[in-house]
């Protein structure tokens, strides 16, 4: 497989006779975006020099935590909440494709507005392209500085850049909604230390949550008003104290999934190990993090409804000595209830991509908080599966490009990247990812850039 920069300027599969704008070899379109010109982008990358992102990570990462951040994909409107527990006005449509990937209106004079479709195209093609345009947004001009003129010309032709479509003036869809990854990096939930215990204080809240930037917000739930909740990071052997304040108008209870408790009354199962947490009350769980790994925390009361509405989060217990070396660390939490098929609470095109620079190794922590199995498929690369449910696989580690993750399971994989490009990364149950309006739901990408400074510059542009 060759680098995108080595590709020819004419897109494969599009002939010059088709009724659509095409470009000749070496011809590069001009995007109407003065703030993301090649000069501006590269200057931002140079100024990053290790980058705001690297500095932020260094400042925010807790002791013994790997330097890196979490990424995730998103979802369509899918299965509804459990019968009898549906919040008013939040039911998902029964049609698995209904409401997904709503296309933005075409610009005046564009094929979408005029009704003049390129030869052989249908309305499906326009909707599908619109979703990708929303996904790339105003980062499109930066691709030239990253991948070079030839690859940039191909990408611009695929997107129909000569139309000057409106998404070129907007941030990517995933930058217009809250993201677990950026929340964890910019506003991490750091514990205080009291009498030798690491103390986390969290609230359980009703929230209005956007699956993507175009859909009407849905009535959801969140920890600290986030879906997923903030990532909790500790080290193996730490004493942990977590206090939850219930701001809902219903009872709840919290389970730390995968923890090997010494005291089973800390397990968080309502009417088995505790009474429900009533509205307005606080409840504290205290335990020793005996086992390391990628764990979770979530509601364990009316769970098919409450977890489906967003009461879920990652609980990472770092080993005292970690033999795994990774340059970046990504959390990928899937769900498939209210809001449809989501990754970290969002559906494509509002799914944050996995970003990495050539030569880096990425650790991805898959966590399935839904009610369906999802086989995650990475294009162009293999994943080395190193842990299941927090247990190192050792010599049983294996490689694959498609990994099925069942409800409640966690898998940790490593991906070492050596070829730049934009690589699709999605669930391979196809009606979870693509329909007659194009891609939706559980779709993300692995974006590999030549240099770390490119990653920093992209992130800086997203958070500016």
Image: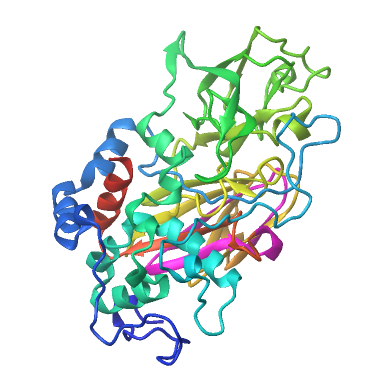
In the rendered view, does 382 fall on the left or right side of 57? right
Instruction: Return the residue nearer the eye: 358 or 88.
Output: 88
Point out the image quarter for the N terminus.
Answer: bottom left
On the question of residue 420 being in view, the answer is: no
Pick whichever, 386 or 100, lies toward us.
100
Instruction: Provide residue 182's location: percent of width, then percent of height.
Output: 40, 39
User: Of residues 151 and 384, which is closer to you in this image?
Assistant: 151
Looking at the picture, does residue 172 appear above or below residue 191? below
Compared to residue 306, the image places residue 31 above or below, namely below
Q: Residue at x 44, y 41 (%)?
A: 181
Q: Quadrant of residue 348?
A: bottom right
Above/below status of 99 relative to 377: above
Q: Position of residue 174 (x, y in %)?
A: 45, 48
Of the 4 image quadrants, the one containing the C terminus is top left
Q: Which residues are magenta?
A: 403-432
Q: How many marks?
A: 0
Please tell me which residue is depicted at 41% across the width and 29% down the height of the picture: 188
In this picture, residue 15 sits left or right of residue 203: left
Work out whether residue 46 can be spotted: yes
* 226 inside magenta stretch: no
Q: How is the image coloured?
A: rainbow
- Residue 46, x across and y down, in percent: 14, 53
Query: Residue at 36% across / 49% down in the picture?
Result: 171
- For residue 200, side relative to residue 166 (left or right): right
Spot occupied by residue 193 in the image (x, y as percentages of width and height): 43, 14
Q: State yes or no: residue 428 in magenta.
A: yes
Please say if 257 is above or below 24.
above
User: Viewer-proximal residue, 421 or 231?
Assistant: 421
């Amino acid at each position: 497989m060759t680098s995108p920069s080595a590709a020819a300027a004419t897109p494969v599969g599009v002939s010059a006779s088709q009724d659509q704008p095409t470009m000749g070899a070496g011809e590069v379109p001009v995007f109407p975006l003065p703030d993301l010109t090649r000069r501006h982008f590269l200057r931002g990358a140079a100024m990053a020099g290790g980058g705001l992102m690297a500095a932020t990570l260094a400042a925010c990462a807790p002791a013994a935590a790997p330097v890196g951040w979490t990424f995730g994909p998103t979802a369509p409107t899918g299965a509804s909440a459990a019968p009898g527990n549906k919040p008013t006005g939040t039911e998902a449509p029964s049609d698995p494709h209904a409401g997904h990937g709503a296309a933005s209106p075409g610009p005046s004079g564009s094929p979408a507005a005029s009704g003049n479709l390129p030869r052989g195209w249908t309305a499906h093609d326009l909707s599908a392209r619109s979703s990708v345009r929303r996904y790339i947004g105003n980062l499109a001009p930066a691709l030239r500085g990253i991948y070079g003129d030839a690859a940039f010309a191909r990408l611009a032709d695929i997107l129909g850049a000569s139309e000057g479509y409106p998404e070129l003036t907007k941030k990517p869809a995933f930058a217009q909604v809250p993201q677990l990854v950026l929340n964890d990096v910019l506003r991490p939930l750091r514990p205080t230390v009291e009498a030798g215990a690491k103390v986390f204080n969290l609230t359980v809240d009703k929230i209005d949550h956007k699956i993507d930037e175009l859909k009407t917000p849905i009535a959801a739930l969140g920890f600290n008003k986030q879906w997923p909740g903030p990532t909790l990071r500790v080290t193996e052997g730490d004493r942990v104290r977590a206090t939850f304040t219930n701001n809902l108008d219903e009872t709840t209870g919290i389970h730390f999934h995968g923890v090997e408790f010494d005291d089973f009354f800390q397990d968080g199962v309502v009417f088995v190990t505790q009474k429900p947490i009533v509205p307005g009350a606080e409840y504290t769980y205290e335990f020793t993090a005996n086992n390391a790994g990628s764990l979770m925390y979530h509601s364990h009361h009316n769970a098919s409804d409450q977890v489906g509405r967003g009461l879920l989060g990652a609980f990472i217990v770092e080993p005292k000595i970690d033999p795994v070396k990774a340059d970046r660390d990504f959390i990928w939490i899937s769900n498939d209830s209210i809001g449809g098929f989501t990754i970290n609470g969002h559906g494509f095109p509002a799914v944050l991509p996995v970003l990495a620079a050539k030569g880096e190794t990425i650790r991805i922590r898959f966590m399935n908080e839904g009610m369906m199995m999802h086989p995650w498929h990475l294009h162009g690369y293999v994943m080395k599966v190193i842990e299941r449910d927090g247990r190192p696989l050792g010599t049983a580690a294996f490689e694959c490009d498609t990994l099925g993750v069942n409800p409640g399971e966690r898998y940790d994989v490593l991906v070492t990247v050596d070829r730049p490009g934009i690589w699709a990364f999605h669930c391979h149950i196809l009606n979870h990812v693509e329909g007659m309006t194009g891609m939706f739901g559980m779709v993300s990408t692995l974006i590999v850039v030549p240099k770390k400074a490119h990653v920093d510059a992209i992130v800086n542009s997203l958070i500016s």
